[in-house]
Amino acid sequence: MKVSELGEFGLIDRLAELLAAHGQGFSDRLAVGIGDDAAVWAGDGGAVIATTDTLVQDVHFLSERTSWRDLGWKALAVNVSDVVAMGGEPDFALVTLALPPEVDVEAVDDLYRGLAEACEAFGATIAGGDIVRAPVTVVTLALTGRAGLDGSGEPLVLRRGGAREGDVIAVTGTLGGAAAGLRALREGDDGSDNALVQRHLRPRPPLAAGPAAVAAGLRCAIDVSDGLLQDLGHVCRASRLAAVVWADKVPIDPGLANAVEAGEALRLAATGGEDYELLVAGPRERIDALAEAIDVPLTVVGEMVIEAEHNARLLDASGHAIEVDIAGWDHLRG
Amino acid sequence: MKVSELGEFGLIDRLAELLAAHGQGFSDRLAVGIGDDAAVWAGDGGAVIATTDTLVQDVHFLSERTSWRDLGWKALAVNVSDVVAMGGEPDFALVTLALPPEVDVEAVDDLYRGLAEACEAFGATIAGGDIVRAPVTVVTLALTGRAGLDGSGEPLVLRRGGAREGDVIAVTGTLGGAAAGLRALREGDDGSDNALVQRHLRPRPPLAAGPAAVAAGLRCAIDVSDGLLQDLGHVCRASRLAAVVWADKVPIDPGLANAVEAGEALRLAATGGEDYELLVAGPRERIDALAEAIDVPLTVVGEMVIEAEHNARLLDASGHAIEVDIAGWDHLRG
């Protein structure tokens, strides 16, 4: 079987099992291992979060339509999103740059300028890295983050598996804009004054929302990177629950109103990837407390329910299922 | 200018300067930033080491002649070597796997088996990672390590810039074997019973030597990954000194005696890469103490001297310079 047939998530499950059989993938000191937005272990005075995300030329970015500076920004931002989704603050980054030998030095300068801008915006520090030759450009960042410990020394973080029956589900900001921006970019929009394209090129994860969610007593989150329904599906499987999402509550990016018709706007908001917003699940009063504490919008979009299938479903205002292709993005199938 | 013209080390210097101008690449909490084997920062109860190294298909490994299992082993081992060179112990690893969609799932299984074997051998734990699609296979590991703190809370680690005039230079194990093994592999040797090829495919950094060097009071080291003279050159520039290496003291891999003629054996030992031995510099009595403490051979090969050019030179028994191309491996020029 080819990896493209098994798909990203099937392969991750398979490898996690294989590693577990070798005594790998977990340890006494590892609080969160494979299968969440980031790994977490307890340090002496706090928890360490560690994540890695990679951008491959013409898979994750269009080399002809993405500036090196935006690429640098995005390479950090997507990792920041994972740290936020664990409830932590970004700390140190390692940058691995694989480059074709014919790339201009000035292009690499621009990549690092974008990285530095993102580090400043998100409070991260580049600590080192590796530069190698490759047939295509690949930018991989590993980012550490910090979180607190509870009274018994356990990391205070947000987990995919932390949802309970009856929890309400909320998302920060708006959805669908990045997917519409990618489409506009593909269709030739240069993006310089298109807010949707900027949303795709320069994601801004809600930095304060992760730690604020922990402070509000929430324990479940994921970042919306592959599409709302797909990412919420991960929460469902990890929490052994189902989720319903009310279509009329989904906070659709206002820029979509002019760009696409209503059904397509909903589809992009429910399944389009790369919004890098934060999805949280928890008791209503804690969700309300989080909404009070942060200065980005937080919208309740659904709730966790008990059903046999651990999946997320989209419902219309009268409670009927809306069929959408929730496959979202698979990093191996593409 | 193309990155291949500037070269890996020129590019790293340039980017470190650019980052510094943006207030990046260092921080109050970062004890070691860009330009050493790994980054180091002080945690509350100890120092955190973080490094990343990447293996690109047909740049760092021959896809037709490297088993997936050996590739997994090597991907971890090369990062372990960096942690050892900082004087630390390996801790948690993040694995980023970029794969062509047509790769067999069984191949990925084997890669992870090799990774798991190396984790067991070197005391590391896989904590997470990322899997993406790419035109060629790229395996990137980020590895954290642990080291101690001194009485004032500063990390107790080995630095490239820690050498002093008169320090003797010593290396663990033997050199040149991996480069000869790579050559044999290229020439069609399947490597299964060739110790040199095994040396190339399954490097074994001297795990205990890093922490033992710190315990012996040493403060300067680098791993021999790009070639003895080139790596020692990094120590020279970071320490603002020169180094002389006595050709007749270089511990040439005994397997080379049968494989190549003597001059070529010396050339491979002095400039061939991927041996992943540890090079240390320090006062003679501390080097002797380290030799006593570890169960791998430690050979004194030269000393640090004051010269205008901060480079490493190879001398014959009568003190005459031996000219070798010390360029070693450049990850951008290839």
Image (cartoon, coloured by chain):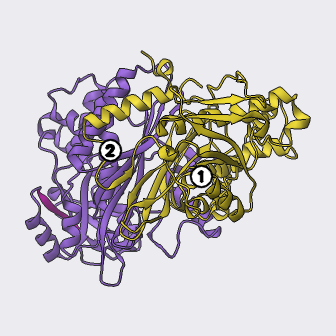
Chain colours: A yellow, B purple
Q: Residue A124 sits in which quadrant? A: bottom right
The percent coordinates of residue A235 (x first, y second) are 53, 39
Q: Quadrant of the C terminus of chain A?
A: top right
Magenta highlight on residue A310 = no
What residue span does the magenta drawing correspond to? B297-303
**Could you tell me the amino acid type at mark 2?**
Leu
Between label 1 and label 2, give the one nearer the viewer: 1
Count of numbered badges drawn on the protein: 2
> Measured from the top left, where is residue B208 in percent x and y?
18, 59
Q: Camera-side residue: B261 or B34?
A: B34
List the residue tagged with mark 2.
B76
Identity of the residue drawn at 46% across and 56% down:
A49
Q: Main secondary structure of the magenta part?
A: strand
Residue A154 in sight from this viewpoint: yes
* Residue A8 in the figure: left or right of residue B258: right
Q: Is the residue A223 above or below the residue A147 in the image?
A: above
Q: Nearer the viewer, residue A240 or B89?
A: A240
Q: Residue at x 91, y 36 (%)?
A: A258
What label sits on residue A283 in the rendered view? 1
Q: Is residue B207 left or right of residue A114?
A: left
Distance from disc 1 to disc 2, alpha carbons, whole Å, reads: 42 Å
- Chain under label 2? B
Task: Give residue B98's position: percent from left, percent from top.
Answer: 49, 33
> Could you confirm whether marks 1 and 2 are on the same chain?
no
Residue type pointed to by label 1: Pro
Res B273 visible: no
